């Protein structure tokens, strides 16, 4: 595993907030303490190694899926603007433990999508789209991408260690 593979993004720095160096984070983690609990974090510019930072404080903007955080040493709007587009990252081995029916986003990406009793390969998971209901983006073997609701009735079996999941799509779902 190379050094860049030892990190996972938990959010993207998307905008400055105010004049004192605070930044807005678009989270890609369902663990709010990663954005609100003070302590050591890392930021990473695309294709570079992460830089350690200290999170001073963070809050969720009410009614929005955006956090505002304060980073030690980032004390002006111009210094905040310099890190727009960077990712907030944590070491892969710091992922919180989950229940049996919960999955980390990055564990789903790349899984083979299989269908039917023979578990025939139909494509690969390329993304998980968060919203009211989570949707798996699956690139079918013929190259077309489809969105599949990530619910137990349609995705009844997930084998992370074997790198596949089974889908039982309702009629017509894969033709959309």
Image (cartoon, rainbow, N blue to C red):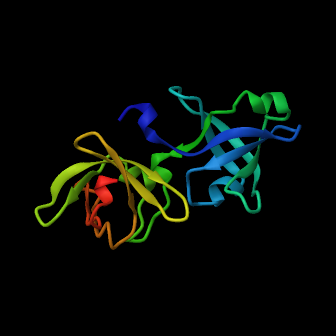
For the N terminus, the image quarter is top left
Percent across and percent down for residue 62 are: 77, 62
Residue 67 in the image: above or below residue 1: below
- Picture quadrant of residue 44: top right
Left or right, 40 with reference to 162: right
Percent across and percent down for residue 119 are: 15, 60
Q: How many marks?
A: 0
Residue reaching furthest right? 19
Toward the viewer: 34 or 86?
A: 86
Residue 167 in the image: above or below residue 76: below
Left or right, 30 with reference to 13: left
Q: Which residue is drawn at 29% across and 70% down?
A: 156
Percent across and percent down for residue 47 are: 50, 26
Q: Residue at x 44, y 40 (%)?
A: 6
Toward the viewer: 88 or 18?
A: 18
Left or right, 174 with reference to 40: left
Residue reaching furthest left? 118
- Picture quadrant of residue 63: bottom right
Q: Which residue is drawn at 32% across and 46% down?
A: 110
Percent across and percent down for residue 69 are: 75, 48
Left or right, 103 with reference to 17: left
Q: Residue at x 33, y 73 (%)?
A: 153
């Amino acid at each position: 595993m190379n050094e860049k593979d030892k990190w996972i993004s938990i959010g993207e720095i998307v905008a400055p907030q105010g004049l004192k160096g605070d930044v807005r984070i678009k989270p890609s983690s369902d663990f709010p303490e990663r954005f609100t609990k003070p302590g050591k974090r890392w930021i990473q510019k695309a294709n570079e190694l992460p830089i350690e930072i200290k999170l001073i404080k963070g809050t969720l903007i009410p009614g929005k899926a955006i956090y505002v955080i304060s980073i030690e040493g980032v004390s002006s709007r111009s210094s905040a603007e310099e890190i727009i587009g960077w990712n907030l990252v944590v070491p892969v081995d710091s992922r919180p433990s989950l229940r049996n029916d919960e999955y980390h986003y990055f564990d789903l990406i790349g899984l083979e999508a299989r269908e039917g009793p023979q578990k025939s390969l139909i494509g690969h998971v390329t993304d998980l789209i968060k919203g009211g209901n989570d949707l798996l983006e699956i690139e079918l073997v013929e190259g077309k991408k489809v969105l599949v609701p990530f619910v137990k009735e349609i995705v009844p079996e997930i084998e992370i260690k074997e790198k596949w999941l089974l889908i039982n799509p309702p009629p017509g779902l894969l033709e959309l």
